[in-house]
Image (cartoon, grey):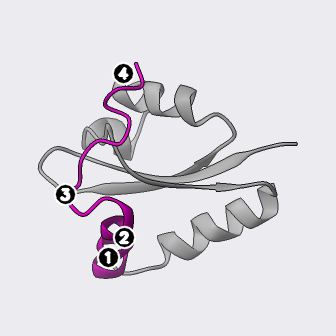
């Protein structure tokens, strides 16, 4: 069975969030933490895992990623708060 994750990472100042999809959440979050992903997340230091959800179908995961990216900031923050009201780094003890 394949597994995919839609995730949200943010920066320390809570000013930026990035939504992505991956088939290896541990590797991808490590890449974010090491600043290896060029572009938005590297520029704004989005290295804290704030939210993630698992999917077994890549099409559903991609559709969910696109859906979340279309949301306004307030709605994204509400989603994060459902599992992480204090905006802690959910991957702080993964490495």
Considering depth in this image, is 29 or 92 the residue closer to the camera? 92
Residue at the spot of label 2: 82
Is 89 contained in the magenta span? yes
- Density class for disc 3 (Cα within 10 Å; few <14, some 14-19, many ≥20) is few
Residue at the spot of label 3: 86
State the CA–CA distance, disc 4 to disc 3.
23 Å
State the CA–CA distance, disc 4 to disc 2.
27 Å
Q: Are marks 2 and 1 in contact (CB under 8 Å)?
A: yes
Vertical arrangement, residue 33 with respect to residue 71, above or below: above
Give the magenta range.
74-95
Left or right of residue 9: residue 89: left
Residue at the spot of label 4: 34
Residue 54 place in picture, x, y as percent = 64, 54
Foreground: disc 4 or disc 3 = 3
Vertical arrangement, residue 3 with respect to residue 73, above or below: above
SS at mark 3 in the image = loop
- Density class for disc 1 (Cα within 10 Å; few <14, some 14-19, many ≥20) is few
Q: Are marks 4 and 3 in contact (CB under 8 Å)?
A: no
Is 20 contained in the magenta span? no
Position of the C terminus, as image quadrant, is top left
Number of the label disc, if any, that sits on residue 46: none
Which circle's residue, 1 or 3, is located before the other in the chain?
1
Q: Are marks 4 and 2 in contact (CB under 8 Å)?
A: no
């Amino acid at each position: 069975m394949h597994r995919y994750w839609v995730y949200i990472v943010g920066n320390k100042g809570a000013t930026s969030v990035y939504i992505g999809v991956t088939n290896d959440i541990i590797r991808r979050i490590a890449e974010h933490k090491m600043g290896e992903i060029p572009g938005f997340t590297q520029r704004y230091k989005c290295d804290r895992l704030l939210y993630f959800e698992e999917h077994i179908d890549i099409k559903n995961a991609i559709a969910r990623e696109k859906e979340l990216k279309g949301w306004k900031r307030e709605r994204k923050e509400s989603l994060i708060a459902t599992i992480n009201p204090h905006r802690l780094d959910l991957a702080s003890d993964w490495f």
